[in-house]
Amino acid sequence: MKKLLFSALLGGVTLVSCTNDDTPTPGAKQIETPVNYTFERDNNSTVSYSGQTTRLQMSSELISDFTKFDEVSAESLSNMFANENSPFDNPSLNESSKSIKSKVAASNLYFSTNNVESAEIKADFENWISVQMNEVASNKDVLAEAGQAGQIADGNAVRYVNSKGLEMDQAFAKSLIGGLVVDQMLNNYLSTAVLDEGDNRTNNDQEILEEGKLYTTMEHKWDEAYGYLYGDPSIPSEDPNSALGNNEDDLLFKYMGRVEGDEDYAGIAEETFEAFKTGRAAIVAGDYETRDAQIAIIRENISQIIGIRAIYYMQAGKNALAANDYGGAFHDLSEGFGFIYSLRFTNKPGTNMPYLSKEKIDMFKEQLLAGNGFWDVTPETLDSISEEIAAAFGLSVAEAAE
């Protein structure tokens, strides 16, 4: 997709595969990029992202419980969000000090001095839980209509929507892709404020390890970014792309697979994986210029996934509405709403800002939910939103909609 960008950013650095015996260019730093995401010190792995795996597992269990109306409550789902009162079926998650909520809208770059918006975003997630287990659950056996929450058929499936046609579980899950995974990856662990904090560069250059660990702080921060994309236990840790389309991840990795499957964007998964490996290898070599070049690639690719899927679902919803398939349309638009919410957490390389402003994203959400929401939304509105997103990302609506 962006091979010219990749080559230009690397400059004069020599990239060497672990299986390549070529002599590096004199005067250039040698970056040994492994075939898989495997890094060792004294024959022991230095890769660690257990906290990210834990939060992905928590998210999966929470999302799967969203429509278990007879088994859960608003309180129990909120407890899962905050990891309070031992809410999980998996006892190891209850024993963890981690939580989903603590890392939502919590990046150093976007929210360290923006506590008001961070609190508002966390409140949105809590509100989706509340609406689901109160308004939607109490009307789960009622047929939904404009202004009335309830159930609606989508082929052989049954969807549960609020009075505006929005599925709370889809809004929650797809917004979590941005609010948790993308924000922590792009705007926290891959930010120079975190990677280069304090004496991190000096300690990395001198191989001063974290106490009782086999990795430097900088190595670990990079791995934590990696873990938010590849950390689900169903994804092979060393060669994750071998599991594309065949894993249990409910968040970003799943949709990277969907975008990879579109021939217009084929190669985005491999390029992202290569950037993660090369950036980690550059940290080992103490080459921070090359590291930062890989950050730009990762930020662009991950942000593009969010933009592409937002457009895809707007157009899928429009087409379903034209066919009078309201259940299918509302499902697509609910997923699209979550991806539009996630646009807030994208990061345009060279700007340290999202591709679209908060004000623009808020306008999109308001347009989608105005009046009776999805019952009233017009093809013109869906096209206008799609075109504005495409323009911001340099995308084609027609290609993203395929």
Image (cartoon, grey):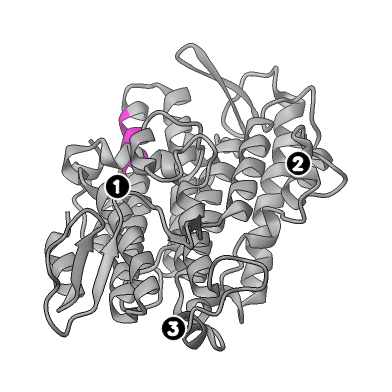
Q: Secondary structure at mark 2?
A: helix
Magenta segment: 312-319
Residue 246: x and y in percent read 40, 28
The residue positioned farthest toward the top in the image shown: 156
Where, quadrant-wise, is the N terminus in this rendering? bottom left
Please name the residue that numbered disc 3 is placed on: 205
Whether the residues at callouts 3 and 2 have beta carbons within 8 Å, the answer is no
Q: Residues within 10 Å of mark 3 (few under 14, many from 20)?
A: some
Please name the residue that numbered disc 1 is placed on: 269
Q: Which quarter of the picture shows residue 265?
A: top left
Residue 170: x and y in percent read 54, 38
Residue type pointed to by label 2: Ser
Of mark 3 and mark 1, the one earlier in the sequence is 3
Residue type pointed to by label 3: Asp
Can residue 366 be seen in this snapshot?
Answer: no
Can residue 1 be seen in this snapshot?
Answer: yes
Distance from label 3 to label 2 (Cα)? 36 Å
Distance from label 2 to label 1 (Cα)? 31 Å
